[in-house]
Image: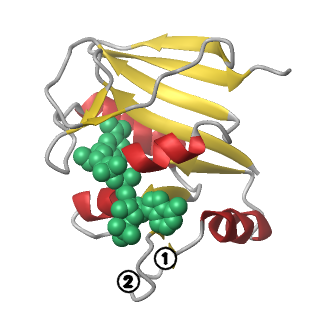
Amino acid sequence: MKKIIIAAVAKNFVIGKDGKMPWHISEELKHFKKTTMNFPLLMGRKTYVSFGAKPLKGRLNCVLTRDENYQSDYDNLKVFNDIDELFNHCGKEGFEKIFIIGGSEIYNSTINHCDEMVLSFLNEDYEGDTYFPEIDENIWNIDNIEKHDRFDVHYYIRRKI
Ligand SMILES: NC(=O)c1ccc[n+]([C@@H]2O[C@H](COP(=O)([O-])OP(=O)(O)OC[C@H]3O[C@@H](n4cnc5c(N)ncnc54)[C@H](OP(=O)(O)O)[C@@H]3O)[C@@H](O)[C@H]2O)c1
Protein backbone atom coordinates (compact mmCIF):
# COMPACT_ATOMS: atom_id res chain seq x y z
CA MET A 1 0.00 0.00 0.00
CA LYS A 2 1.42 3.35 -1.11
CA LYS A 3 1.69 6.02 1.59
CA ILE A 4 1.04 9.46 0.15
CA ILE A 5 1.29 12.78 1.98
CA ILE A 6 -1.17 15.42 0.82
CA ALA A 7 -1.04 19.02 2.08
CA ALA A 8 -1.67 22.64 1.19
CA VAL A 9 1.46 24.65 1.95
CA ALA A 10 1.89 28.44 1.98
CA LYS A 11 4.89 29.99 0.23
CA ASN A 12 6.54 30.34 3.69
CA PHE A 13 5.64 26.67 4.52
CA VAL A 14 2.85 27.60 6.99
CA ILE A 15 0.07 24.99 7.09
CA GLY A 16 -1.97 26.03 10.14
CA LYS A 17 -2.85 28.76 12.59
CA ASP A 18 -4.71 28.41 15.92
CA GLY A 19 -5.69 24.82 15.07
CA LYS A 20 -7.15 25.71 11.66
CA MET A 21 -6.04 26.24 8.08
CA PRO A 22 -5.42 29.98 7.66
CA TRP A 23 -7.12 30.17 4.21
CA HIS A 24 -10.21 29.00 2.37
CA ILE A 25 -9.54 28.13 -1.26
CA SER A 26 -12.45 26.13 -2.66
CA GLU A 27 -10.54 25.00 -5.77
CA GLU A 28 -7.87 23.52 -3.50
CA LEU A 29 -10.50 21.76 -1.38
CA LYS A 30 -12.00 20.31 -4.59
CA HIS A 31 -8.57 19.01 -5.61
CA PHE A 32 -8.13 17.44 -2.13
CA LYS A 33 -11.56 15.79 -2.28
CA LYS A 34 -11.10 14.45 -5.82
CA THR A 35 -7.62 13.07 -5.06
CA THR A 36 -8.50 11.37 -1.78
CA MET A 37 -12.08 10.16 -2.46
CA ASN A 38 -12.61 6.44 -1.68
CA PHE A 39 -9.15 6.06 -0.11
CA PRO A 40 -8.35 5.88 3.61
CA LEU A 41 -7.02 9.00 5.36
CA LEU A 42 -4.50 9.14 8.20
CA MET A 43 -4.79 12.23 10.39
CA GLY A 44 -3.58 13.40 13.79
CA ARG A 45 -6.20 13.91 16.48
CA LYS A 46 -5.74 17.71 16.32
CA THR A 47 -6.47 17.80 12.59
CA TYR A 48 -9.55 15.65 13.16
CA VAL A 49 -10.73 18.13 15.81
CA SER A 50 -10.10 20.97 13.33
CA PHE A 51 -12.80 19.40 11.09
CA GLY A 52 -15.26 19.70 13.99
CA ALA A 53 -14.51 16.09 15.07
CA LYS A 54 -16.59 14.78 12.15
CA PRO A 55 -15.13 12.37 9.59
CA LEU A 56 -14.77 13.36 5.93
CA LYS A 57 -17.37 11.59 3.80
CA GLY A 58 -16.67 8.78 1.35
CA ARG A 59 -13.36 7.86 2.96
CA LEU A 60 -12.23 5.74 5.92
CA ASN A 61 -10.95 8.30 8.44
CA CYS A 62 -8.12 6.89 10.60
CA VAL A 63 -7.38 9.14 13.58
CA LEU A 64 -4.12 8.77 15.50
CA THR A 65 -4.02 9.64 19.21
CA ARG A 66 -1.99 8.61 22.25
CA ASP A 67 -5.17 8.71 24.34
CA GLU A 68 -6.33 5.10 24.78
CA ASN A 69 -9.79 6.26 25.79
CA TYR A 70 -10.38 8.55 22.82
CA GLN A 71 -13.72 7.79 21.21
CA SER A 72 -15.63 9.12 18.25
CA ASP A 73 -18.46 7.02 16.96
CA TYR A 74 -18.92 7.03 13.20
CA ASP A 75 -19.12 4.15 10.71
CA ASN A 76 -16.28 5.53 8.57
CA LEU A 77 -13.95 6.40 11.46
CA LYS A 78 -11.36 4.30 13.28
CA VAL A 79 -9.16 5.48 16.15
CA PHE A 80 -5.60 4.12 16.48
CA ASN A 81 -2.91 4.54 19.16
CA ASP A 82 -0.17 3.08 16.98
CA ILE A 83 0.72 4.20 13.45
CA ASP A 84 1.99 0.76 12.29
CA GLU A 85 -1.24 -0.85 13.45
CA LEU A 86 -3.12 1.78 11.42
CA PHE A 87 -1.09 1.05 8.25
CA ASN A 88 -1.46 -2.74 8.79
CA HIS A 89 -5.22 -2.39 9.16
CA CYS A 90 -5.59 -0.42 5.91
CA GLY A 91 -3.21 -2.76 4.09
CA LYS A 92 -5.24 -5.79 5.18
CA GLU A 93 -8.43 -4.08 3.99
CA GLY A 94 -6.84 -4.19 0.52
CA PHE A 95 -6.44 -0.46 -0.10
CA GLU A 96 -3.92 0.35 -2.82
CA LYS A 97 -3.00 3.69 -1.16
CA ILE A 98 -3.50 5.74 1.98
CA PHE A 99 -3.40 9.54 2.13
CA ILE A 100 -1.61 11.15 5.08
CA ILE A 101 -3.49 14.40 5.57
CA GLY A 102 -1.68 16.05 8.51
CA GLY A 103 -1.12 17.98 10.54
CA SER A 104 2.40 19.10 11.23
CA GLU A 105 3.31 16.44 13.83
CA ILE A 106 2.05 13.68 11.52
CA TYR A 107 3.84 15.09 8.43
CA ASN A 108 7.08 15.35 10.42
CA SER A 109 6.90 11.75 11.58
CA THR A 110 5.92 10.27 8.18
CA ILE A 111 7.85 12.31 5.58
CA ASN A 112 10.83 9.94 5.77
CA HIS A 113 8.65 6.84 5.38
CA CYS A 114 6.12 7.79 2.70
CA ASP A 115 6.32 6.99 -1.03
CA GLU A 116 4.81 10.09 -2.63
CA MET A 117 3.66 13.63 -1.82
CA VAL A 118 0.93 15.75 -3.39
CA LEU A 119 1.62 19.30 -2.24
CA SER A 120 -0.46 22.34 -3.18
CA PHE A 121 1.92 25.29 -2.94
CA LEU A 122 -0.03 28.50 -2.45
CA ASN A 123 1.21 31.63 -4.20
CA GLU A 124 1.25 33.70 -0.97
CA ASP A 125 2.83 33.73 2.50
CA TYR A 126 0.46 33.29 5.47
CA GLU A 127 0.86 33.94 9.18
CA GLY A 128 0.72 30.74 11.20
CA ASP A 129 2.04 28.52 13.96
CA THR A 130 2.41 25.13 12.25
CA TYR A 131 4.67 24.33 9.32
CA PHE A 132 5.29 21.67 6.69
CA PRO A 133 8.72 20.01 7.12
CA GLU A 134 11.68 20.86 4.92
CA ILE A 135 11.74 18.96 1.60
CA ASP A 136 15.11 17.39 0.83
CA GLU A 137 15.69 17.67 -2.95
CA ASN A 138 18.17 14.77 -2.73
CA ILE A 139 15.31 12.53 -1.64
CA TRP A 140 12.37 13.86 -3.63
CA ASN A 141 11.83 14.19 -7.40
CA ILE A 142 9.07 16.38 -8.81
CA ASP A 143 7.19 14.19 -11.28
CA ASN A 144 4.60 16.75 -12.40
CA ILE A 145 3.33 20.26 -11.65
CA GLU A 146 -0.33 21.18 -12.15
CA LYS A 147 -1.04 24.92 -12.34
CA HIS A 148 -4.09 26.51 -10.73
CA ASP A 149 -5.05 30.17 -10.12
CA ARG A 150 -3.88 30.52 -6.50
CA PHE A 151 -1.72 27.41 -6.11
CA ASP A 152 0.32 24.84 -8.03
CA VAL A 153 0.16 21.15 -7.20
CA HIS A 154 3.59 19.50 -7.08
CA TYR A 155 3.57 15.70 -7.40
CA TYR A 156 6.65 14.28 -5.66
CA ILE A 157 8.04 10.76 -5.92
CA ARG A 158 10.75 9.46 -3.59
CA ARG A 159 14.03 8.99 -5.50
CA LYS A 160 15.13 5.39 -5.87
CA ILE A 161 18.50 4.93 -4.18
N1 LIG B 1 -2.51 22.92 5.29
C1 LIG B 1 -2.80 21.64 5.39
O1 LIG B 1 -2.82 20.90 4.39
C2 LIG B 1 -3.13 21.06 6.73
C3 LIG B 1 -3.50 19.71 6.83
C4 LIG B 1 -3.80 19.18 8.09
C5 LIG B 1 -3.72 19.99 9.21
N2 LIG B 1 -3.34 21.29 9.07
C6 LIG B 1 -3.21 22.15 10.26
O2 LIG B 1 -2.20 21.60 11.12
C7 LIG B 1 -2.52 21.95 12.48
C8 LIG B 1 -2.55 20.70 13.32
O3 LIG B 1 -1.26 20.10 13.31
P1 LIG B 1 -0.56 19.59 14.67
O4 LIG B 1 0.84 19.22 14.36
O5 LIG B 1 -0.81 20.61 15.73
O6 LIG B 1 -1.43 18.33 15.07
P2 LIG B 1 -1.75 16.92 14.31
O7 LIG B 1 -0.51 16.41 13.65
O8 LIG B 1 -2.99 17.07 13.50
O9 LIG B 1 -2.15 16.00 15.54
C9 LIG B 1 -1.21 15.75 16.56
C10 LIG B 1 -1.80 14.71 17.48
O10 LIG B 1 -1.81 13.43 16.83
C11 LIG B 1 -1.59 12.42 17.79
N3 LIG B 1 -0.33 11.73 17.44
C12 LIG B 1 0.73 12.22 16.74
N4 LIG B 1 1.70 11.28 16.60
C13 LIG B 1 1.24 10.17 17.22
C14 LIG B 1 1.77 8.87 17.40
N5 LIG B 1 2.97 8.51 16.92
N6 LIG B 1 1.02 7.97 18.07
C15 LIG B 1 -0.21 8.29 18.56
N7 LIG B 1 -0.76 9.51 18.40
C16 LIG B 1 -0.06 10.44 17.75
C17 LIG B 1 -1.51 13.10 19.14
O11 LIG B 1 -2.86 13.15 19.59
P3 LIG B 1 -3.25 13.22 21.17
O12 LIG B 1 -2.83 14.59 21.62
O13 LIG B 1 -4.73 13.02 21.17
O14 LIG B 1 -2.50 12.12 21.84
C18 LIG B 1 -1.02 14.50 18.77
O15 LIG B 1 -1.30 15.49 19.73
C19 LIG B 1 -3.87 22.66 12.43
O16 LIG B 1 -3.66 24.07 12.39
C20 LIG B 1 -4.46 22.21 11.11
O17 LIG B 1 -5.41 23.12 10.58
C21 LIG B 1 -3.05 21.84 7.86
Nearest the camera: 83 or 27?
A: 83
Q: Position of residue 30 (x, y in %)?
A: 36, 37
Name the amino acid, label 1. Val
Compared with residue 21, is residue 49 higher up or lower down, i.e. above or below? below
> Is residue 56 among what the camera can see?
no
Residue 70 got which mark?
2
CB contact under 8 Å: marks 2 and 1: yes
Q: Is mark 2 within 8 Å of ligand 1?
A: yes
Residue at image x 42%, y 35%? 7
Label 1 crowding class (10 Å Cα cut-off): few <14, some 14-19, many 20+?
Answer: many
Colour theme? secondary structure
Residue at image x 26%, y 15%? 150
Residue at image x 37%, y 19%? 121
Nearest the camera: 91 or 11?
A: 11
Q: Position of residue 47 (x, y in %)?
A: 32, 56
Residue at image x 52%, y 56%? 41
Q: CA distance from mark 2 to mark 1?
A: 7 Å
**Residue matched to label 1:** 79
> Is residue 9 among what the camera can see?
yes
Nearest the camera: 72 or 146?
A: 72
**Image quadrant in which you'd find residue 73:** bottom left
Q: Is mark 1 within 8 Å of ligand 1?
A: no
Instruction: Find numbered disc 1 in the image and state the secondary structure of the residue it sits on.
Output: strand
Ligand 1 occupies quarter: bottom left
Compared with residue 79, is residue 46 higher up or lower down, i.e. above or below? above
Name the amino acid, label 2. Tyr
Q: Earlier in the sequence, mark 2 or mark 1?
A: 2
Label 2 crowding class (10 Å Cα cut-off): few <14, some 14-19, many 20+?
Answer: few
Compared with residue 53, is residue 8 higher up or lower down, i.e. above or below? above
Residue 18 as seen in the image, left or right of residue 138? left
